[in-house]
Image: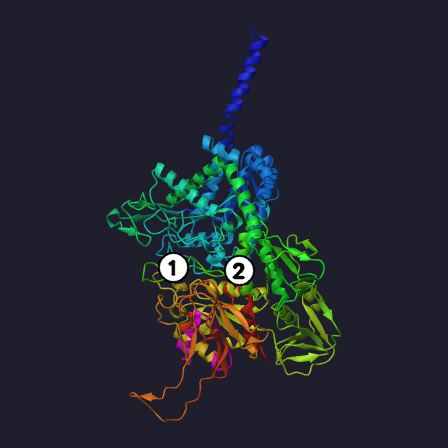
């Protein structure tokens, strides 16, 4: 007979068994990626596209209370972007609490005593992402397995991570690119081009530069992430997965190479190395050789996914893993090189490569395993030291605030009155997106005898993200470094100089001493200054030549059926003088009042035709050359054409060769090597459809287009192609120079502008141009020497070349690093217009639209386009 007590015991035992089986039941009911994809992550020849990954993430979110999926925006092409919060069930219930603690500590909103308390109470916040560079395929696949394991595994380590860490996972940073590359691989599987890369950019505009947009935030993919990192969650560790390790290695990891930017808090440098050390140790203990450190990647440049965090007191991590393709590969151990990565020995004697990989079979799954192992090492460290990481980000922020008091400046002031107020507000918004706190003056004020209008912006440097602010506002002084004594310069990772006010042509006043002014905090975004229309506009509306916004408004009026003119000289209307190159628009179906408000433009109504010579322009039609050699400069150019509402056609090689080019007012060739433009892809590397270049046939078509009255524009490296093919009386002054003598790896160079030239209307007379291993021009001159003597002969006709921009005579380097600049480019032309038949060729020795950063040189492009569209 069963007693009441024994019944209770049996019930209790059943309950205990049920509870003990819960983790197992959860693991059984939560689907794995393999259940959804139909293959194991990292399997040979297999890839999941974004729809499959989206499907899996939705199923994981629905089946696990340790996962919360959140949509954070859409891509350029409209795909949805998600992040996953993965932690314990209890932690996910209190996400707002952990977010609030992280914010207070990162922003230094509490006292030191309260910070210590919150650091003990809070949870470490770690950002993990994959899928940024789409041709690096493993990380976009790996993240699904990582999410599943973190949500379901019941090991002591995983439970500790869930209890102590809020993991924010970005499964695929570039969904559009993932589908492009996956589709390309599947179409070419089993062919000679199985491991080739797509012949188009895998981000619609930026391609590989989607890891170069992290302070400008021009693209939605970048900003969707930035707002989480620097305006909402403030993770203490930001981990970017990449996949480009040196040959014959498995993974490149911290510590990184010299130099380090002195604006970064030294605790960040140490923290980065600490994470790298934890990774190396784990790889060694798990018998996973091939981890190399101190390789190429530095901690100086600002602007990348893992480098911008440094300036926000966050530990930024980049690892580069080998084997990007699902196609297996074999490394013959007998062919193991003695050194890798530019000189690191493979015998185990180098402290940064103590456990070399000796070769053998290599599979896509290896890359997945190395990424997972590195991630677990990072999260394990964060879980063990969560209070330390939380308190450290507070201490570094507090130190930044104190440093502003000790070293200054007190503040930066961006006056309302600017050459181009539109771009000054754009600068403010770049800083706001990056988490900088900015105030707007509510009254007129005066500092050191200078008067500022209400609406001017004040940026106090006493804030936690001071390193970020200072690095973007001040010039860079990149250290002179050589590969070895007497050898070539040690090329910086990416750029050496990027100072934003210089690039954008904005005047910023640095104020050393404290001052008081009535302000209000700018929340989210700064609106453009109030625009409007003043005066009787019975004749038309006048738009300033100084503002980039005038170009967008003019194009919108033209597209709506209106008319537009450009003035050829300065003129007065009433008591006000307006500069040459001003736009006068009228008619059309768009309301100019609305456009003025949208762009913050002060539009002047003209009651009568002004007494100045004008050129009528029609809606410009632009042809943009796009090689099958994917070219990021083409993407950035296309982005700017779209941003400013130019009607643009993409022209491939066959279009140049066969299309009626006379329909285009201007043709643009973005920066690309002459050989690459002419010959394109080899049949050994790409399917036939995507091989070959512009060829002699295309070059002849371009020549005829210009001879018959067209305008051809070429940027930087592409200028060499035009000079060679057209036989122009120009040379590249930097051609053949030794890098030990002349070297400008990516810096801002002072350049003078002939503002009386129509192609330079609206420009300031001195600008910073983006010089990235660029060039300078030399105009050919007649030689009267023969056999050692001088000949008394008549002068030949002078080359019909007009100089619009010239590199400065002295003090050329504005920001970054330069060697030999005075000898090789000083006083030499940087932009020219050459007559060719009835048309003209406009050549830039630099890139005036580089990564959509140098807004101060955009008008050189816009003026050229409108000159081509003149009637």
At 51% from the left and 54% from the top, the residue drawn is: 176
Q: Nearer the viewer, residue 6 or 864?
A: 864
x and y percent of residue 711 in the render?
51, 77
452 on left or right of 656: right
Looking at the image, the residue that sits furthest to the right is 536
Up-down relation of residue 99 to residue 654 (above or below): above
- Residue underneath mark 2: 474
Q: What element carries label 1?
A: loop
Pick the front one: 480 or 688: 480
Numbered circle sitting on residue 481: 1
Residue situated furthest top in the rendering: 1
Task: Please provide percent x and percent y for residue 25.
Answer: 51, 28
Q: What element carries label 2?
A: loop
Say which residue appears at 28% left-offset and 47% top-offset. Answer: 346
In the displayed structure, 712 sits above or below 393; it is below
Q: Name the residue nearer the viewer: 601 or 805.
A: 805
Q: Where is residue 269 in the image (x, y as percent from the top left)?
A: 45, 47
Task: State how far apart marks 1 and 2 are (Cα).
Answer: 21 Å
Q: Which colour scheme is used?
A: rainbow
Magenta extent: 706-728
Q: Where is residue 525 in the image (x, y as percent from the top left)?
A: 64, 55
């Amino acid at each position: 007979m069963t007693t009441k007590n024994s019944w209770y015991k049996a019930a209790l035992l059943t309950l205990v068994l049920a509870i003990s089986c819960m983790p197992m039941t959860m693991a059984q009911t939560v689907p794995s990626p393999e259940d959804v994809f139909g293959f194991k992550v990292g399997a040979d020849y297999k890839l999941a596209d974004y729809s499959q990954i989206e499907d899996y993430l939705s199923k994981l979110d629905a089946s696990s209370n340790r996962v919360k999926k959140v949509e954070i925006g859409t891509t350029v092409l409209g795909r949805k972007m998600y992040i996953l919060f993965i932690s314990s069930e209890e932690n996910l219930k209190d996400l707002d609490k952990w977010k609030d603690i992280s914010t207070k500590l990162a922003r230094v909103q509490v006292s030191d005593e309260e910070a210590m308390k919150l650091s003990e109470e809070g949870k470490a916040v770690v950002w993990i992402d994959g899928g940024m560079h789409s041709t690096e395929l493993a990380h976009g696949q790996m993240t699904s397995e990582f999410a599943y394991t973190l949500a379901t595994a019941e090991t002591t380590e995983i439970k500790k991570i869930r209890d102590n860490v809020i993991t924010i996972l970005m499964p695929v940073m570039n969904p559009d690119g993932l589908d492009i590359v996956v589709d390309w691989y599947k179409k070419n599987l089993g062919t000679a081009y199985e491991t080739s890369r797509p012949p188009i950019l895998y981000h619609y505009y930026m391609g590989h530069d989607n890891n170069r947009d992290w302070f400008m935030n021009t693209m939605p993919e970048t900003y969707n992430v930035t707002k989480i990192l620097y305006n909402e969650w403030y993770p203490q560790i930001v981990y970017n997965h990449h996949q480009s390790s040196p040959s014959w290695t498995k993974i490149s990891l911290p510590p990184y190479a010299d130099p380090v930017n002195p604006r970064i808090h030294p605790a960040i440098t140490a923290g980065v190395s600490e994470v790298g050390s934890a990774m190396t140790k784990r790889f060694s203990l798990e018998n996973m050789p091939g981890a190399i450190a101190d390789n190429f990647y530095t901690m100086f440049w600002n602007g990348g996914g893992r480098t911008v965090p440094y300036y926000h007191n966050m530990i930024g991590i980049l690892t580069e893993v080998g084997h990007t393709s699902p196609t297996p590969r074999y490394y013959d151990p007998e062919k193991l090189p003695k050194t890798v990565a530019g000189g690191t020995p493979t015998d185990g004697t180098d402290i940064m490569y103590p456990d070399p990989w000796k070769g053998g079979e290599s599979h896509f799954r290896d890359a997945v395993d190395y990424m997972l192992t590195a991630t677990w090492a990072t999260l394990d460290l964060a879980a063990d030291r969560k209070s330390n990481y939380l308190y450290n980000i507070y201490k570094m922020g507090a130190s930044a605030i104190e440093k502003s008091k000790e070293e200054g400046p007190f503040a930066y002031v961006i006056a309302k009155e600017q050459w181009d107020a539109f771009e000054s507000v754009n600068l403010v918004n770049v800083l706001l997106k990056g988490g900088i706190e900015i105030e707007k003056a509510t009254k007129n004020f005066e500092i050191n005898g200078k008067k500022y209008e209400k609406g001017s912006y004040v940026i106090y440097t006493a804030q936690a993200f001071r390193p970020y602010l200072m690095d973007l506002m001040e010039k860079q002084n990149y250290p002179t470094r050589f590969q070895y004594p007497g050898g070539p310069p040690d090329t910086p990772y990416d750029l050496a100089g990027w100072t934003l006010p210089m690039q954008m042509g904005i005047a910023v006043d640095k104020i050393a001493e404290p001052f008081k002014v009535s302000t209000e905090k700018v929340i989210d975004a700064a609106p453009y200054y109030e625009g409007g229309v003043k005066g009787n506009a019975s004749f038309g509306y006048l738009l300033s030549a100084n503002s980039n916004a005038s170009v967008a408004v003019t194009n919108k009026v033209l597209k709506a059926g209106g008319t537009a003119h450009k003035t050829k000289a300065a003129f007065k209307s009433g008591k006000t003088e307006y500069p040459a190159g001003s736009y006068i628009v009228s008619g059309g179906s768009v309301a100019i009042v609305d456009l003025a408000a949208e762009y913050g433009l002060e539009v002047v109504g003209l009651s009568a035709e002004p007494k100045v010579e004008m050129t009528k322009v029609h809606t410009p039609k632009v042809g943009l050359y796009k090689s099958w050699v994917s070219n990021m400069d083409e993407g950035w150019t296309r982005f700017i054409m779209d941003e400013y509402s130019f009607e643009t056609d993409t022209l491939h090689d066959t279009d140049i060769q066969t299309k009626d080019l006379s329909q285009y007012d201007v043709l643009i060739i973005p920066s690309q090597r002459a050989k690459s433009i002419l010959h394109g892809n080899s049949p050994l590397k790409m399917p036939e459809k995507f091989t070959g270049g512009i060829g002699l046939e295309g070059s002849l078509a371009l020549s005829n287009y210009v001879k018959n009255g067209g305008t051809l524009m070429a940027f930087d490296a592409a200028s060499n192609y035009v000079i060679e093919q057209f036989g122009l009386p120009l040379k590249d002054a930097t051609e053949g120079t030794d890098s030990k003598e002349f070297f400008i790896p990516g810096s801002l160079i002072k350049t003078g502008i002939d503002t009386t030239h129509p192609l330079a209307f609206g420009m300031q007379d001195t600008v910073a141009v983006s010089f990235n291993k660029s060039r300078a021009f030399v105009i050919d001159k007649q030689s009267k020497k023969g056999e050692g003597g001088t000949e008394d002969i008549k002068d030949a006709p002078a080359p019909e070349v007009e100089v619009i921009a010239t590199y400065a005579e002295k003090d050329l380097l504005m920001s970054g690093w330069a060697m030999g600049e005075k000898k090789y480019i000083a006083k030499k032309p940087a932009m020219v217009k050459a007559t060719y038949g009835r048309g003209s060729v406009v050549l830039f020795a630099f890139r005036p639209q580089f990564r959509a950063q140098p807004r101060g040189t955009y008008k050189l492009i816009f003026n050229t386009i409108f000159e081509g569209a003149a009637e």
